[in-house]
């Protein structure tokens, strides 16, 4: 069977057919062929903003063509294998091994087996040491690059930090080296000098060199694609996206993105307005998401909405404001979106614990925010909490129940009946680059005890449904989050035993991982327990701008249940402003 | 005003499902800045009707979409649409009507051509299936096989040097051309390439006979005003 015939036999063939509207010119003359690989299905991968940014950034470069490839679903993969076909790119249907560079976007830890799955389907060896010049250069990037160690052995290099500028520099260097006929190793030596590039074979735990993350310095004027690829089938985030700003002023102590994407860089409301107009004209999406890590903190939000609302209305386009903080939830914002359901994340049930994690929201603010929302006609509330946070006691868990009861009471002051409160509880995962990077993760029996305690108590509150994250998945995520190079072997062994699509509950098999860990003699408590403060952690050679001292100070304050105010209330000297001008520092 | 566009569904667009197809059109119309009428209510949506669903993986040059719009001229509408249409979903004809022609409800049949090898040897037998009073075809759905008499759903079968052309029921009842031609191929010992299956005509029933959709729409079209002569 040819690939065309195979497509007639698989579920959702449009995942593999390509041909999206706004696909750039694939026939142009080029000497560097890049393929961005997403180790997840089309519907998930195509929802990623980073993919769209880098894809269009590369394709506007002279001499560079960038294509895409997503992890094939199992039915498609089986038919490819049966017919002796390797995995191909979407655009020109070229086998992945015929590209110059494959760039893997790694969004989070549970996608690690997906990388091997894609390499395997493309008939490319897993380990960098087993690949010579005949194979493409394998590059990694995305949020997981903050600790690349667990997957370091699979990659030739990583792009750490923001990719837009770095990826252009990297392909330019690759072009020059290819023309000169330099060896892979010579190229890697030169690549290492580019800011943000980490080469695992030249920078080993025994001989460490610091890698500084890459940051876009001029966020206001940097290229932003508005003729974005239009997905052929419905994807998870099926809308246009505009980034209002990078970074976050809040400093929640568990949040990796909040520290990793510093410093804060705002886009002016004029630029955002222009981007939105162009997006409507060039994509035709019926929804634009005004995205950031905390949209309510965008200082020009009111001015922006005043400009955008009439434009959106005329074009029948909905404006979505994700990531609003409760405290910033005001009447006028609620009026701009569809009144389906509200989502807020108090993260912890008591004020004490919210202070520990520096989630600067008070019960009073929650009441005010929700009161406004209920007045607006919202009837459905989703609340996100985290369980197993440092210093957490059963009292804090009971605080969640109390908070939910109060919200319920508040609701009935505004409406009769029809209430729908969803409480979702994830498990705390200590993440690199945060003040909690040294903390322990509670073990599985303790997770279970706390989850069931909450479940039993919330069952007594009418109109509430309770969801909680899978314990085994959370544990594995924590192991990888703080993993070292010893874990590459674990990922490979688990993959060989059949682990893949671990982020999909129906495909996740803990037994496989358990067996693989036992076989390799991996002690999970080494990764899950509290980490010593006096030794460098496996990822600390990566300089994210925020200093170790700052993180330690924040950790101390957490234990004293002391808050740190937002960056808008004065610079705290985290260190990120040395990487690029911080708009909050500039304001002063 | 109503505009009906006749369009192709081919290339990588042949893999788009019916529900995703609607999404492609609403987005293209918004890109084109076309003034489409919207429904009332909580979640207003564009007033668009897609015709009979085309099975996934089949190419077509005879698909129709009906749009309620304040743009009065179908030809301009088509030009604006084509300027921003995804490759493989280009419009080829436009009709301007005063009322909705209800194509989804009136469509009864369609013509398909499929690439074949070896059917000429058994041409007479193959073409004569159209005269059969009963034709039992096994249909497998979700692992279960049932036998169905498809004779009433077959309107025509012709063998050409390298294609097999069939006219089959399409609309309220549909006989899938890929399944039917594969069935004939197996029954009479030739091969068909269903990856190269093309729909090229669609019919409504008018006065007991099949009428090409284009002719039907032309009859309903608003006649262009010719400058009045005295």
Image (spheres, grey):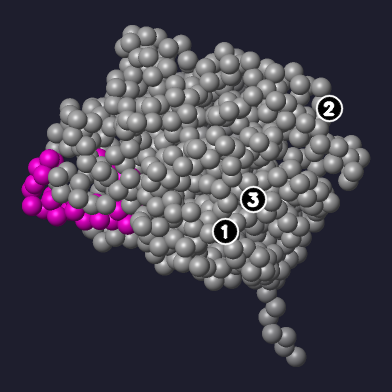
Can you identify the residue that label 1 sits on? A569
Instruction: Looking at the picture, tell me which residue is in the foreground, A321 or A198.
Output: A198
Q: Position of residue A175 (x, y in %)?
A: 17, 53
The reply to whether callout 2 and callout 1 are in contact (CB within 8 Å) is: no
Is the stretch drawn in magenta largely helix, strand or loop?
A: helix
Q: Pointer 3 indicates a residue of which chain?
A: A
Nearest the eye: A566 or A166 = A566
- Between the residue at mark 3 and the residue at mark 1, the CA separation in whole angstroms equals 19 Å
- In this figure, which residue is indicated by the disc labeled 2? A462
Task: Write the residue at 71% across / 58% down.
Answer: A333
Distance from label 2 to label 1 (Cα)? 40 Å
At x 48%, y 25%, the residue is: A440
Pointer 2 local density, CA inside 10 Å: few below 14, some 14–19, many at least 20: few
Q: Is residue A532 left or right of residue A61?
A: right
What stretch of residues is rendered in magenta?
A157-186
Give the vertical position of A559 relative to A502 (above or below).
below
When the figure is inspected, residue A261 is found, relative to residue A416, above or below; the finding is below
The image quadrant that residue A397 belongs to is top right
Q: Chain of mark 1?
A: A
| 10 Å crowding of disc 3: few (<14), some (14-19), many (20+) | many
Question: For residue A531, what is the image quadrant?
Answer: top left
Q: Residues within 10 Å of mark 1 (few under 14, many from 20)?
A: few
Residue A324's disc is 3
Mark positioned earlier in the residue sequence (3 or 1): 3
Locate residue B167, reporting x and y percent: 57, 38
């Amino acid at each position: 069977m040819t690939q065309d015939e195979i497509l007639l036999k698989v579920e959702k063939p449009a995942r593999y057919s390509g041909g999206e509207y706004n696909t750039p010119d694939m026939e142009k003359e080029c000497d560097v062929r890049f393929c961005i690989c997403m180790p997840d299905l089309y519907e998930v991968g195509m929802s990623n903003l980073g993919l769209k940014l880098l894809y269009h950034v590369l394709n506007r470069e002279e001499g560079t063509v960038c294509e895409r490839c997503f992890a094939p679903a199992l039915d498609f993969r089986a038919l490819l294998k049966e017919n002796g076909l390797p995995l191909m790119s979407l655009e020109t249907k070229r086998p992945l091994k015929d590209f110059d560079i494959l760039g893997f976007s790694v969004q989070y830890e549970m996608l690690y087996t997906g990388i091997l799955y894609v390499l395997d389907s493309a008939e490319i060896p897993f380990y960098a040491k087993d690949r010579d010049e005949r194979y493409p250069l394998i590059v990694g990037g995305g949020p997981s690059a903050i600790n690349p160690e667990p997957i370091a052995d699979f990659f030739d290099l990583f792009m750490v930090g923001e990719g837009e500028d770095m990826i252009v520099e990297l392909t330019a260097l690759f072009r020059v080296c290819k023309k000169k006929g330099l060896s892979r190793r010579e190229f890697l030596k030169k690549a290492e000098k580019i800011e943000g590039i980490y080469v695992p074979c030249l920078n080993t735990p025994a001989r460490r060199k610091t890698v500084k993350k890459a940051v876009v310095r001029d966020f206001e004027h940097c290229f932003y694609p508005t003729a974005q690829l239009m997905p052929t089938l419905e994807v998870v985030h099926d809308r246009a996206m505009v980034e209002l700003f990078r970074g976050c002023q809040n400093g929640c102590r568990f949040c990796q993105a909040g520290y990793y994407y510093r410093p804060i860089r705002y886009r002016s409301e004029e630029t955002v307005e222009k981007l939105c107009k162009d997006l409507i004209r060039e994509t035709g999406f019926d929804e634009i998401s005004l995205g950031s890590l905390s949209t309510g903190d965008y200082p020009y939000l009111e001015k922006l909405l005043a400009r955008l609302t009439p434009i959106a209305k005329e074009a029948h386009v909905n404006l979505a404001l994700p990531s609003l903080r409760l405290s910033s939830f005001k009447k006028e914002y609620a009026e701009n979106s569809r009144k389906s359901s509200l989502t807020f994340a108090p993260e912890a049930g008591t004020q004490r614990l919210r202070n520990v994690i520096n989630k600067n929201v008070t019960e009073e603010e929650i009441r005010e925010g929700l009161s406004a929302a209920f007045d607006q006609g919202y009837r459905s509330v989703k609340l996100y909490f985290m369980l197993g946070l440092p210093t957490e006691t059963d009292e804090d868990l009971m605080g969640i129940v109390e908070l939910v009861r109060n919200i319920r009471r508040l609701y009935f002051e505004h409406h009769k009946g029809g209430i729908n409160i969803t409480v979702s509880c994830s498990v705390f995962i200590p993440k690199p680059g945060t003040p909690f990077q040294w903390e322990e993760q509670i073990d599985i029996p303790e997770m279970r005890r706390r989850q069931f305690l909450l479940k039993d108590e919330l069952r007594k509150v009418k109109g509430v449904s309770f969801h909680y994250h899978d314990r085994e998945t959370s544990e594995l995520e924590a192991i990888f989050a703080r993993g070292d190079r010893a874990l590459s072997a674990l990922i490979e062994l688990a993959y060989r035993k059949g682990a893949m699509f671990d982020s999909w509950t129906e495909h996740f098999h803990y037994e496989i991982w358990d067996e693989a860990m036992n076989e390799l003699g991996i002690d999970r408590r080494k990764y899950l327990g509290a980490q010593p403060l006096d030794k460098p952690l496996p990822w600390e050679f990566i300089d994210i701008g925020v200093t170790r001292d700052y993180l330690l100070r924040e950790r101390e304050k957490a234990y004293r249940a002391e808050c740190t105010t937002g960056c808008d209330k004065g610079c705290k000297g985290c260190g990120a402003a040395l990487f690029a001008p911080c708009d909050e520092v500039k304001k002063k | 005003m109503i505009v009906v566009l006749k369009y192709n569904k081919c290339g990588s667009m042949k893999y788009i499902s019916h529900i995703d197809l609607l999404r492609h059109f609403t987005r293209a119309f918004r890109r084109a800045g076309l003034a489409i009428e919207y429904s009332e209510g909580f979640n207003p949506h564009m007033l668009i009707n897609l015709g009979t669903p085309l099975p996934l993986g089949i190419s077509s040059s005879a698909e129709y979409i009906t749009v309620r719009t304040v743009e009065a001229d179908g030809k301009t509408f088509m030009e604006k649409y084509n300027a921003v249409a995804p490759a493989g979903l280009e419009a080829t004809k436009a009709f301007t009507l005063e009322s909705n022609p209800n194509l989804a409800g009136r469509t009864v049949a369609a013509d398909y051509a499929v690439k074949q090898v070896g059917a000429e040897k058994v041409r007479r037998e193959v073409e004569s299936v159209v005269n059969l009073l009963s034709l039992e075809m096994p249909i497998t759905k979700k692992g279960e096989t049932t036998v169905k008499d498809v004779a009433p759903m077959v309107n025509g079968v012709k063998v050409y040097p390298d294609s097999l052309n069939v006219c089959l029921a399409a609309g309220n009842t549909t006989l899938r051309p890929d399944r039917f031609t594969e069935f004939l191929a197996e029954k009479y010992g030739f091969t068909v390439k269903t990856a190269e299956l093309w729909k090229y005509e669609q019919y409504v029933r008018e006065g007991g006979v099949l009428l090409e959709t284009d002719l039907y729409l032309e009859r309903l079209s608003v006649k262009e005003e010719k400058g009045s002569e005295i």
